[in-house]
Image (spheres, rainbow, N blue to C red):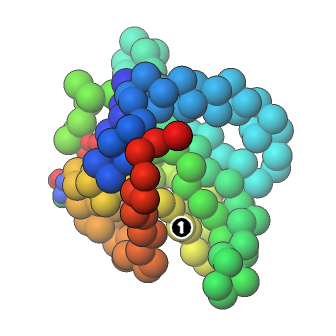
């Protein structure tokens, strides 16, 4: 759960790590409703002792708002920090891509990543993901 703050934006200074963790935990607790959908994919990586090392969660049948193309969307990818750089993230994404191609039969996978999370941006670019649109934000008053 600590990894969720890797996606924190420096442009929203009023939002605490505690709030991000709380919000993401609430999302996590609703996971079972998503997983009941046939277009949902959850792939988990374990170590040799069966301990959880990372996971990827994605959903198919997501409509791209500009092109109207039906595609898959990656909602969460995270790898336990002591396993970073060992190919787990890459293996999880390869499994997710196979699911999208062979089972969902979509041509595209989209995802959102916080620009400040340079490690994740570099990781996705290495895997062939392209920056397609840029989401912008401006703080117009202190957080309410
Ligand atoms: C991003 C994350 C999933 C990567 O997982 P990982 O298991 O460390 O990645 P891998 O070891 O599979 O790396 C795969 C490749 O990407 C490369 N890579 C990793 N970080 C990179 C970076 N910042 N720039 C360029 N390449 C990078 C690795 O060198 C490796 O390539 P190689 O096998 O040719 O050497 C992991 O760091 C993580 O969980 N971060 C916190 C959560 C997060 O940010 N999730 C994404 C938010 S959407």
The N terminus: image quadrant:
top left
Q: Is residue 11 above or below residue 16?
A: below
**Quadrant position of residue 108:** bottom right
Nearest the viewer among 28 and 81 is 28
* Callout count: 1
Which residue is most to the top?
Answer: 49
Residue 102 visible? The answer is no
Q: Secondary structure at mark 1?
A: strand
Residue at 82% x, 49% y: name it.
Answer: 38
Res 3 seen here: yes
For the residue pair 75 and 55, the one nearer the viewer reads as: 75
> In the depicted view, which residue is nearer to us: 132 or 59?
132
Residue underneath mark 1: 110
Against 54, is 124 above or below?
Answer: below
Spot occupied by residue 100 in the image (x, y as percentages of width and height): 63, 62
Residue 63 placed where, x, y %? 72, 73
**Dot 1, how many residues are within 10 Å of its Cα: few (below 14), some (14-19), or many (20+)?**
some
Whether ligand 1 has any atom under 8 Å from the Cβ at mark 1 is answered as no
Q: Residue at x 31, y 60 (%)?
A: 115
Extreme residue toward the front, this view? 141
Quadrant in the rendering for residue 74: bottom right
Residue drawn at x 73%, y 30% as measured from the top left: 30
Q: Residue at x 81, y 35 (%)?
A: 33
On the rendered structure, is 3 left or right of 102? left
Where residue 104 appears, x then y in whole percent? 72, 64
Is residue 123 depicted above or below 43 in this figure?
A: below
* x and y percentages locating residue 52 in the rendered image: 45, 21
Q: Is residue 32 above or below residue 124?
A: above
- Residue 53 appears in which quarter of the rendering? top left
């Amino acid at each position: 759960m600590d990894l969720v703050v890797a996606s924190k934006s420096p442009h929203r200074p009023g939002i605490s790590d505690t709030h991000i963790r709380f919000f993401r935990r609430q999302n996590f607790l609703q996971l079972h409703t998503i997983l009941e959908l046939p277009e949902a994919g959850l792939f988990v990586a374990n170590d040799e002792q069966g301990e959880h090392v990372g996971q990827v969660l994605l959903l198919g049948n997501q409509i791209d708002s500009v092109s109207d193309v039906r595609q898959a969307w990656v909602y969460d990818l995270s790898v336990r920090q002591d396993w970073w750089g060992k190919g787990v993230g890459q293996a999880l994404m390869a499994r997710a891509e196979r699911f999208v191609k062979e089972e969902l039969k979509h041509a595209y996978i989209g995802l959102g990543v916080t620009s400040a999370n340079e490690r994740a941006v570099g990781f996705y670019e290495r895997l062939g993901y392209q920056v397609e649109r840029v989401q912008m934000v401006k703080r117009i008053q202190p957080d309410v």
